[in-house]
Structures are given as C-alpha cells and as structure tokens.
C-alpha cells in the first residue's frame, strides 16, 4: 500500500523538538507525511487502533513521560503488525547504555539530536532515504549510531 | 582417683584394726601367761606343802602303828584269857597288815617310813606287867584313836585316789581293832 | 616431672611398707628372744632348785651317818635324835622333788631308785642301832652291816651325783642353744633396723628434693599466672574452664571485668553469667551452651553482654577440651571483648556507605546535570541556527554579530557540558572489565575523530596492541582525548604526526612509576609533533579545569586530560606527560598486567 510519500511519525514530548522536526521535513525535498505524538501512550494508542496508518519510519524520543521510548520500542517489536516500521531512536542522550539497550531491542538506527538546523535536515533526509531492507537485515552496531 | 582413695583408706583402716587387735591379743596373752605362771607356782607350792604334810602324817601314822604293834605284842604276854590273847594277836596282825600297806604306799610316794619301831622307845611300853596292862590297853586304845584321827586328816590332805582307797581300808581295819581293844578293856575290867 | 614424682611416691610407699614390716619383724623377734631369755633363766632356776634338793638329800644322809658314828662311838642315845629328824627332812626333800620333777620321767625313775636306796640305808641305820646296845663293835654282823651301809651310801651318792650331772648337762645343752640364738638374733635385728633407718633417710632425702622442686615450680607458676592475668587485662580477654563431670565452672579474674564486675564477685555458674547476656542473644547462647555441655567443645560463638551501667559489649568465645590427671574432661575456654573492633568496623561501614551515597549522588548529579543541561543548550543552538538561516536578511550586521557571538558561547557551553558528561561517565561505579581488542578501540577512536583527522591530514601510526583487560568505552575515550589533543595542538608549519607505541615493561625499571602495585605494565606512548609544552607544567595539565592556553588561542575546557587521568586510574595504571616547547609532547600510559 505504498503511496508516493513516505509516512513519518515522531513521538517526542518536547514541543520545540516537534517544531524543529516538522519544519525540517517541510524544507526537505522529499515527499513526506509527518505526524507527531506527544508521548508514548498517544503513540501506541494510535498504532494499535484499527484504522491506523502505519508509518514507514518512526522516530522515537527516549525520555518521555508515561511511556518511554524504550518501552514503546519493546511493544512495537513484539507486535508482528509493526514489523515493517523502521525505527529510529531520536534522543538527546548518546550514552552507551541507551545505545546498547535500543540496539538490543531492535531499533534500526540511533540519532543524537543535532544542535544545528542544517545538520538536522541533512540527518533526517539521510535516514528517510536509507534502503531499509538492506539496513534491517544487517544489524550492525557500528552503523547503528549515525555519525554526522 | 576415687578408687585409689578408697583403697588407701581401706588398707589403712584394716592395718589399724589389725595392729590394735594384735596389741590387745598379745597383751591379753601376756596377762594370761602371767596368771598361769602365778597359778602354776602357787599350785607347785601347794603341792609341795601337801606332799610334806602327807609325809609327816604318814610318818606319825606309821609311828603310832609301830607302838600299837609293840603294845599288842607285849600285852599278849601278860593277858591270861585265851580269847583275849587271840584278840590281841588279831589286833597285832591287823596292824602289821596296815604297816605293810602303809609301807607300800609310802614307797610309791617316795616317802620314807620305818618298817619297824623306832629306837627311841618308851621303856614304859616294854615294861608291861599285870599291874599296868589296863593302863597299857588304854594307851593302846588312845593310840588307835589317834590313828583314826590321823587317817582322817590324811584323807583330807592327800590327792591320790589309790591312797584314799588304802586309807579307807585301813580306817575300817583300825575301827575294827579299836572295837576289839575296847572289848578287851571291858573284858579285862570285868575280870579283875 | 610428674612421672618422676609418682615414681618417687611408689618408692616412698615401698619404703614405708618395708620399714613397717621390718619393725614388726624386729618387734616379734625381740619378743621371742625375751621370752626365750626368761624361759632359759627359769630353766636355770628350776635345775638349781632340783640340784639343791638332791644335795640336801645327800647332806641329810651325811648328818644321819654322822649321828650314827656318834652313837657307835659313845653309845649315847642323844646321837640317835638326828637320825629320826633326818627322815622327816628327807621326806620333805622328796616332797619338793616330786613336784619339781613332774615333767621329767628320767629323773622320776632316778628318784624312785634313790628313795629305795635311801630306805635301805635308813634300814641299815636302824639295824645297826638295834644290834649295837647288845653287841660289840667287833661283831662280824655289825661290821658287815656297817660295810653294807657304806656301800649303800656310796651308791646313793653316785646316783644323786649322776642325777645332778644329768640335769646340768641338760641345762648346758639348752643354754648353748639359747646362747646361739641370743647372739644371732641381736645382730640380725640390729642390721635390719639399720637398713630400715637407711631406707627412711633415703626416703626423707627424696621427699625433701621433691618438695624443693615443687616449690620452685610453684613459684614459676605463680609468676606465670600473674603474667597471664596481666596479659588478659591488656588484650581484653578472660579465660574460663568447664569440668564436664562435675559440671563446675571457674572464671578468671578478667572474665569478671569483661562483664563490668569486680573479680570473683559472684559464683561462676552459667546462670549467673546469662544474667549479663543481652536479652536478644540469651536464647541462642543457651542453646550453644547446651551443645557445648554435650560435645565438650565450643566452636567460635558471638554474643553481647550488658554491663550494670548499661554498656553493651560484644564478646567472642571459644573452647577446646583437654583431659586432666584424674581422667576428667576439662573444657578450656577464652572469651574476648571485640566491641572495639565491631564498633570501628561499623563506623567504617557507615563512612563507606556515606561515601558511596555521596559518590552516587554526585555521580548522578553530575550525569543528570550534564544531560539535562544539554537539552536547553541544544534548543538555543538550533533556534540560533534557524534564526541565522531564516532571518539573516532581516537582521542588521550588529544583530548577526551578536547571534554569532551567542553561538560561540553556546558552543563553548556545549563543549563544557560534553566534557563534564564524559567526566561523570568515567566516574561510574559499575565498571565492567573485559578483554578487549585495543586495536579496534583505537580504530573506533579514529572514527570518532574522522573529520578532524581528514581535515588536518593527520598521520597516525600505531603498533599492534595485544588484547588487554580494560573497560572498553573508557579506553576508547582515552584514545579520543589524547588523539584529539595531539591534533588540536598541532604545530602550524607541519602536518600533525602521531606515533603510538606499545611495550611490556618491568615496573621497577620505570622511573616514572612510583610505588608500583604490580610487577609488569603495558606501556603505551603517544608521541606527537605539535606545539608541545613547558615540562614545568607536566603535572599541572592533568589537574581538573587547568589549561595552559586561554580559550581564544585554543578551545578547550581543561577537563580532557583529567578524564584521561581518571580513566587510567580506574584501570589502576599511571599516566605521565613530557613536553618540549615547539617540538612536541609525549604522553605515557601504564596499564597493569594482572
């Protein structure tokens, strides 16, 4: 059911980050449809609903109230319905622990939130254009953390 | 430790008991011995004095016997009647028997008595004639009496059974002759 | 020593018995010889009595003969008197002899014979008396009688003398026997007594020696006991004994002091002791005591006691059994006051926990602060960049300059926060060591700095590293910092060249290692050709927040090398630096080999 736009979803509790995200995608010359959720609960509620439009790429913030990104990741990975979603961890922290945990839980890629808008656009466009088939099949820790 | 203690005390106890017993026993023995000794000595002394008395009495008895024999012999010569003479003879014979018996006994007893009369004779005895024959008979009687008296004493003093038997025999003999003497005296008194 | 003593005791006992026995024997023998002596003297008396009587007989006969002679000569009847008297005297003698010779049959027979002869002689006397008044001395009958008399007399004398001799012989025999006994016995007795005395003297000597030895041993024991008491007081422990059979305890003086009481102030029973034990420990202690009674041993036990003044003390007790002379099992026990140790241990634990808590707090504070500070900072930077992009045309040059300055300040803050974060991460308590491929870590570090390396065309050469037991991410960080520094402080005129070498060295031979904890170390040396530094500051550069240049010359937070030092210290290693201004710097890392 692939249309010619890429379905992107972000779960992040920070308003500013959501703003940056959507602004960035607005400026990227890729056809995307972006949806955002304020926390893990909203996200999972939506994903689990009957007529959910599943995203191609899901961007997960880690530090969210109610349900953290790691928990959402676990839930998503457990549900075969969501196996086609490419999951990107999108977080402020780049601690070994977080990287390790998300990698083990099956996230596809890890992005540390850049502090520069231009870098942000570059990173986001890189992520959405990755050929996810190749990427998911080779779970490789070296490539897990996106370097920019 | 307990056993050893017990043993020590037991041994000590027995030892002490033994010692005391031994002491008492030996003391007792010593005292008994002493008593025995004293008794023995006393008995000895008594025996010696008894023997001495016996000998003395026997001697006196035999002496009197000799006198009786002599008198009766002398009286035979001065008595007239045949029956009386016979009596006197019997008396003499009896007393000779007694003399023999006494002599045998004395020999057994290691007592020395003369076999016949002593030498210190009373002339009065030999010189018997018609006038003093009754006096002589009286003397005879008294002598025989004395003999009985001595016999009695001897009987009391002596310890020997055989001697006592002899004495009893002699006593009966002498009593018999005493009677005879008495008869003689009476008879002679009647006649004169 | 005790063996020798008991040997001596049996020796003494033997001596005692022997001496007693000897004395008894001596006593018995003495008694017997006295009895024998008495008997012998009695025997003498007896014999002499008999002999005297026999002689009396003889003398009486002689007197009678003398009387006879007198009469024959004088024909005076006064001489006859003695003859009569003599008969009764003779009878008396015989009376005595009869009794004296009751137990002598031979003598009895002799007496009978003598009596017969005497009677014959007396008869002979009589015959001669009777015949003489009439006849004449010259009468042949008289003469024959007279001669007969003499013969009889002779035979009597002979007989009597013979009897006397026999008695004397017998006496001599018995005397000689007694004499020999009498001589032998005293000598024997005397020698036995002497032996006994010697034995007793020897015994006395041995007793005296033993007493002296015992005394000196006792003195030693007294001294030893005193010193034990002292040592108990100093080391705060007490000793006790438990006699299993008698169920009796003894407590040493210091044991009472451990309970806060005066020595020997109460009877040493277990009930009295339990009164002092902490109520919480009483039950367990009672059980342990019951077990102790059964097994006659006490493994280490711990319990508390409360003194009368309320002080609580911790005690440790232990007991071991021995068997004494009387075959009784005695448990020897020691109880020590370990309150001080426990208190200091507790205090230490508390301090440790406090420190750990503090550490944790600081750590988490550090981390969280750094982490949470990043958020707003990032926002600032991002918005700034947006502003630059979107509104650049609308801003005045001054405005743009201000924005640029804000961005600089923000970047500096970011650096600081990043480094602080790094620093706090290197502090984390849970450090997992693993055998890591150092080469890979180095490669990863190079990757992290890939941009800068390619920008400056830095050349990095390295030896091949063996695998070392490390905390991988920290070592990686270490490499990143050092390489980063080397490139940052490059010399203007030349391309940065960094050389990394590796050796295994002996700790003693390395001057820079002071008080090494291990014998061998990995020596990793980073040498660069940058601007170097004055060696005077070799130690200072590792101090937190300390810099040799200001932020306009070279950016930096002064945390990097502190982090390196921390990481190396985490690995129980050492890091040193040497530099030459204008030539380059050398950083040496020592990592211990376990």
Image (spheres, rainbow, N blue to C red):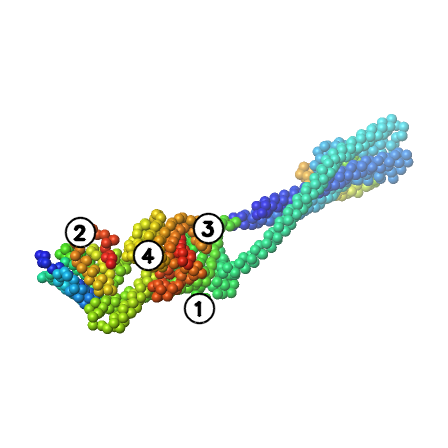
Check disc 3 and report its element: helix, strand or loop: helix
Q: Are marks 2 and 4 on the same chain?
A: no
Alpha carbons under labels 3 and 4: distance apart: 30 Å
Nearer to us: label 2 or label 1: 2
Nearer to us: label 1 or label 3: 3
Alpha carbons under labels 2 and 1: distance apart: 77 Å
Nearer to us: label 2 or label 4: 4
Mark 4 = which residue?
C480
* View extreme (front): residue: C493
Mark 3 = which residue?
C508
Mark 2 = which residue?
A134
Q: Which chain is mark 4 on?
A: C
Nearer to us: label 3 or label 4: 4
Which residue is rendered at x = 62% and y = 50% of the image? Answer: C213
Closer to the camera in the image, C334 or C351: C351
Q: Is residue C307 left or right of residue B91?
A: left
Alpha carbons under labels 1 and 4: distance apart: 62 Å
Mark 1 = which residue?
C310
Closer to the camera in the image, B59 or C275: C275
Check disc 1 and report its element: helix, strand or loop: loop
Check disc 4 and report its element: helix, strand or loop: helix
Check disc 2 and report its element: helix, strand or loop: helix
Residue A32 falls in image quadrant: bottom left
Closer to the camera in the image, B181 or C107: C107
Vertical side of A65 occupied by B100: above or below: above
Which residue is rendered at x = 23% and y = 57% of the image? Answer: A146
Nearer to us: label 1 or label 4: 4
Alpha carbons under labels 1 and 3: distance apart: 56 Å
């Amino acid at each position: 059911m692939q249309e010619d736009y890429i379905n992107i979803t972000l779960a992040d509790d920070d308003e500013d980050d959501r703003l940056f995200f959507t602004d960035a995608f607005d400026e990227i010359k890729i056809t995307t449809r972006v949806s955002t959720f304020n926390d893990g609960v909203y996200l999972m509620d939506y994903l689990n609903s009957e007529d959910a439009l599943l995203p191609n790429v899901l961007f997960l913030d880690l530090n969210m109230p109610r349900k953290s990104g790691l928990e959402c990741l676990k839930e998503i990975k457990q549900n075969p319905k969501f196996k086609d979603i490419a999951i990107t961890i999108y977080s402020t922290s780049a601690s070994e622990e977080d990287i390790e945990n998300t990698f083990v839980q099956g996230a596809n890629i890890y992005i540390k939130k850049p502090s520069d808008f231009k870098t942000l656009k570059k990173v986001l466009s890189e992520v959405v254009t990755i050929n996810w088939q190749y990427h998911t099949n080779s779970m490789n820790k070296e490539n897990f953390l996106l370097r920019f | 430790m307990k056993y050893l203690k017990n043993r020590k005390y037991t041994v000590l106890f027995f030892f002490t008991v033994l010692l005391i017993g031994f002491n008492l026993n030996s003391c007792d023995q010593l005292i008994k011995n002493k008593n025995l000794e004293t008794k023995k000595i006393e008995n000895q002394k008594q025996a010696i004095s008894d023997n001495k008395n016996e000998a003395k009495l026997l001697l006196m008895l035999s002496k009197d016997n000799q006198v009786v024999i002599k008198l009766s012999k002398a009286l035979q010569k001065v008595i007239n009647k045949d029956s009386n003479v016979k009596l006197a003879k019997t008396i003499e014979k009896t007393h000779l028997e007694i003399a023999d018996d006494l002599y045998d006994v004395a020999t057994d007893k290691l007592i020395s008595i003369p076999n016949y009369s002593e030498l210190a004779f009373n002339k009065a005895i030999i010189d018997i004639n018609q006038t003093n024959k009754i006096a002589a008979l009286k003397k005879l009687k008294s002598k025989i009496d004395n003999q009985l008296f001595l016999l009695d004493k001897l009987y009391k003093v002596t310890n020997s059974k055989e001697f006592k038997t002899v004495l009893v025999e002699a006593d009966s003999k002498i009593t018999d002759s005493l009677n005879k003497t008495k008869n003689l005296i009476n008879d002679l008194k009647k006649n004169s | 020593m005790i063996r020798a003593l008991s040997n001596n005791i049996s020796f003494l006992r033997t001596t005692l018995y022997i001496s007693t026995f000897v004395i008894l024997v001596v006593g018995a023998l003495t008694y017997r010889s006295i009895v024998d002596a008495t008997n012998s003297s009695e025997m003498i008396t007896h014999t002499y009595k008999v002999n005297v009587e026999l002689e009396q007989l003889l003398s009486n006969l002689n007197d009678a003969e003398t009387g006879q002679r007198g009469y024959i000569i004088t024909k005076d009847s006064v001489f006859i008197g003695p003859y009569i008297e003599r008969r009764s005297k003779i009878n008396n003698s015989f009376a005595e002899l009869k009794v004296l010779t009751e137990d002598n049959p031979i003598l009895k027979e002799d007496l009978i014979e003598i009596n017969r002869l005497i009677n014959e002689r007396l008869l002979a006397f009589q015959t001669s008396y009777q015949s003489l008044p009439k006849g004449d001395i010259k009468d042949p009958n008289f003469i024959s009688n007279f001669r007969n008399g003499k013969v009889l007399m002779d035979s009597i004398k002979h007989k009597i003398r013979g009897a006397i001799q026999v008695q004397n012989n017998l006496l001599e025999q018995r005397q000689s026997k007694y004499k020999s006994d009498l001589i032998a016995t005293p000598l024997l007795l005397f020698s036995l007594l002497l032996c006994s005395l010697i034995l007793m003297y020897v015994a006395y000597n041995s007793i005296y020696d033993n007493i002296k030895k015992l005394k000196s041993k006792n003195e030693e024991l007294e001294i030893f006991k005193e010193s034990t008491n002292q040592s108990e007081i100093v080391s705060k422990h007490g000793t006790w004994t438990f006699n299993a059979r008698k169920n009796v305890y003894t407590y040493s003086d210091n044991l009472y002091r451990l309970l806060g009481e005066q020595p020997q102030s109460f009877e040493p029973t277990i009930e009295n002791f339990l009164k002092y034990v902490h109520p919480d420990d009483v039950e367990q202690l009672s059980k342990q005591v019951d077990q102790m009674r059964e097994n006659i041993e006490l493994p280490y036990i711990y319990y508390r006691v409360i003194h009368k003044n309320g002080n609580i003390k911790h005690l440790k007790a232990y007991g071991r059994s021995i068997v004494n002379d009387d075959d009784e099992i005695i448990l020897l026990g020691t109880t020590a006051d370990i309150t001080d140790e426990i208190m200091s241990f507790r205090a230490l634990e508390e301090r440790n926990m406090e420190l750990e808590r503090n550490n944790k707090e600081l750590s988490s504070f550090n981390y969280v602060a750094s982490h949470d500070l990043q958020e707003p900072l990032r926002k600032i930077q991002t918005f700034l960049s947006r502003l630059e992009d979107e509104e650049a045309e609308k801003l005045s040059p001054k405005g743009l300059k201000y924005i640029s300055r804000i961005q600089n300040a923000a970047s500096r803050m970011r650096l600081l926060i990043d480094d602080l974060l790094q620093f706090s991460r290197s502090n984390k308590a849970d450090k997992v060591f693993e055998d890591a491929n150092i080469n890979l870590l180095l490669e990863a570090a190079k990757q992290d700095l890939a941009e800068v390396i390619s920008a400056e065309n830095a050349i990095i050469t390295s030896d091949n590293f063996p695998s070392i037991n490390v905390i991988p991410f920290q070592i990686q960080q270490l490499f990143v910092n050092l390489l980063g520094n080397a490139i940052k402080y490059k010399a203007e005129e030349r391309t940065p060249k960094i050389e990394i070498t590796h050796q295994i060295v002996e700790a003693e031979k390395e001057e820079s290692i002071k008080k090494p904890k291990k014998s061998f170390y990995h020596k990793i040396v980073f040498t660069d050709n940058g601007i170097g530094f004055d060696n005077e500051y070799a130690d200072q550069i590792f101090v937190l927040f300390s810099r040799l240049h200001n932020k306009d010359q070279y950016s930096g937070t002064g945390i990097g090398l502190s982090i390196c030092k921390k990481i190396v210290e985490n690995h129980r290693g050492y890091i040193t630096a040497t530099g030459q201004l204008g030539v380059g710097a050398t950083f040496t890392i020592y990592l211990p080999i376990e």
